[in-house]
Image (tube, rainbow, N blue to C red):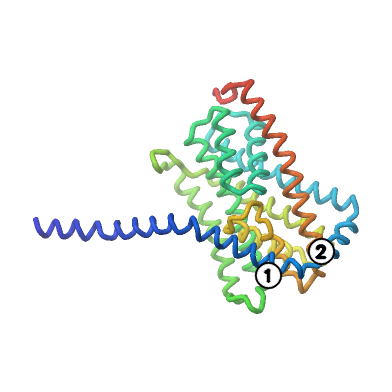
């Protein structure tokens, strides 16, 4: 009896420790992440007077309308392509919402996600619009999960390829060298490949997560995920490449954009405000004049973030009105 009690007590100690660690992290991240955001904002504000704002304004004025229209076209294509991520979720879950409505919900959520943060756009707005359409929580969770996986797996594949090929050289003062960056790139590619293999091997197997049944998509859908996401990130890089006047190699422009995107995700600032500018200034200030660089970043923010938000608001109002006039009709199989 005493031996069994001692064993039971020992077995519960690790679980208590892990529970305590998780609780500490949950409490600490509420103030750690905002502090990181405040620190970055403070750093940006302290250097704001050093930015060549007059040069940025002149750079914006020098853009031809045709160039801006072309960049807007690339931004529109990127947002439209992102909307297809939820169509993959539709195929996987086999829900009955029409393709146009599924796509419209994804595009609307993406526009709000970019400007207001992932919790508002990527999760909350999707959940509301899909719930208004009649989908259950389990299906919505799978759609959101598929969309997130699609976005970041394609990111990993593309960024990993750039790192592994040595297309991006880290700054001289960076704590990581070119060799380590290549290794990271290979690991990122292997993770994307492992996902496809897992989808092929574990197809049809289900897991219960918080009383919800989840399963991986087919290997074919996994390949579609990688292709769509990588194409979407490539379009984003192309938009910035044109705005920079092709002064920087495309691979470098794309690499900096990928770096700015991941920094923006881990920094709790809506729309990554200031983060995009800070990363570009830090990594490309030696290759492009500061005024031209800031002008390109500001133009990119206007064309990829702000204008699509206006379209997202219109789509959101339309979807809400459609939901009110067609209650749960589209969700019926």
Residue sitting at x 70%, y 34%: 315
Query: Taking 134 as reference, is 210 above or below it?
Result: below
Query: Taking 319 as reference, is 295 above or below it?
Result: below
Which of the two residues, 294 or 97, is positioned nearer the viewer here?
294
Structural distance between the alpha carbons of marks 1 and 2: 28 Å
- Dot placed on the residue nearer the N-terminal end, 1 or 2: 2
Neighbour tally class for label 2: few under 14, some 14-19, many 20 plus, Cα within 10 Å: some
Answer with left or right where residue 327 lies relative to residue 171.
left
Instruction: Name the residue beneath numbered marker 2.
Output: 53
Tell me the element at label 1: loop
Residue 274 location, x and y as percent? 69, 60
Residue 11 location, x and y as percent? 23, 58
Query: Taking 125 as reference, is 19 above or below it?
Result: below
| Residue 246 seen in this snapshot | no
Query: Taking 178 as reference, is 77 above or below it?
Result: above
Residue sitting at x 49%, y 48%: 200
Mark 1 and mark 2 residues within 8 Å of each other at the beta carbon: no
Neighbour tally class for label 1: few under 14, some 14-19, many 20 plus, Cα within 10 Å: some
Q: In which quadrant of the rendered image does the N terminus lie?
A: bottom left
Q: Which mark is residue 168?
A: 1
Residue 262 location, x and y as percent? 61, 59
């Amino acid at each position: 009896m005493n031996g069994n009690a001692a064993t039971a007590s020992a077995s519960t100690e690790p679980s208590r420790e892990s529970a305590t660690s998780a609780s500490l992290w949950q409490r600490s991240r509420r103030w750690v992440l905002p502090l990181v955001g405040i620190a970055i904002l403070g750093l940006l504000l302290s250097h704001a007077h050093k930015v060549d704002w007059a040069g940025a304004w002149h750079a914006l004025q020098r853009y031809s309308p045709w160039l801006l229209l072309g960049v807007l076209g690339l931004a529109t294509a990127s947002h439209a392509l992102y909307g297809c991520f939820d169509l993959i979720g539709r195929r996987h879950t086999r829900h009955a919402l029409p393709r146009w409505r599924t796509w419209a919900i994804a595009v609307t959520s993406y526009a709000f996600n970019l400007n207001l943060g992932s919790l508002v756009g990527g999760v909350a707005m999707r959940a509301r619009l899909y719930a208004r359409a009649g989908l259950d929580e389990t299906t919505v969770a799978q759609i959101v999960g598929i969309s997130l996986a699609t976005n970041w797996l394609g990111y990993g594949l593309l960024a990993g390829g750039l790192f592994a090929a040595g297309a991006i050289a880290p700054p001289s003062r960076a704590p990581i060298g070119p060799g380590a960056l290549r290794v990271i790139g290979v690991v990122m590619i292997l993770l994307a490949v492992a996902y496809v293999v897992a989808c092929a091997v574990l197809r049809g197997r289900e897991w219960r997560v918080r009383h919800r049944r989840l399963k991986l998509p087919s290997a074919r859908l996994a390949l579609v995920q990688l292709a769509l996401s990588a194409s979407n990130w490539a379009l984003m890089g192309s938009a910035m490449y044109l705005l920079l006047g092709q002064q920087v190699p495309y691979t470098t422009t794309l690499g900096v954009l990928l770096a700015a995107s991941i920094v923006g995700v881990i920094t709790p600032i809506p729309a990554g405000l200031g983060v995009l500018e800070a990363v570009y200034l830090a990594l490309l200030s030696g290759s492009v004049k500061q005024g031209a660089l800031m002008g390109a970043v500001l133009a990119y923010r206007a064309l990829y973030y702000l204008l699509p938000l206006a379209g997202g608001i219109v789509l959101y109002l339309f979807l809400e009105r459609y939901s009110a006039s067609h209650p749960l009709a589209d969700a019926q199989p």
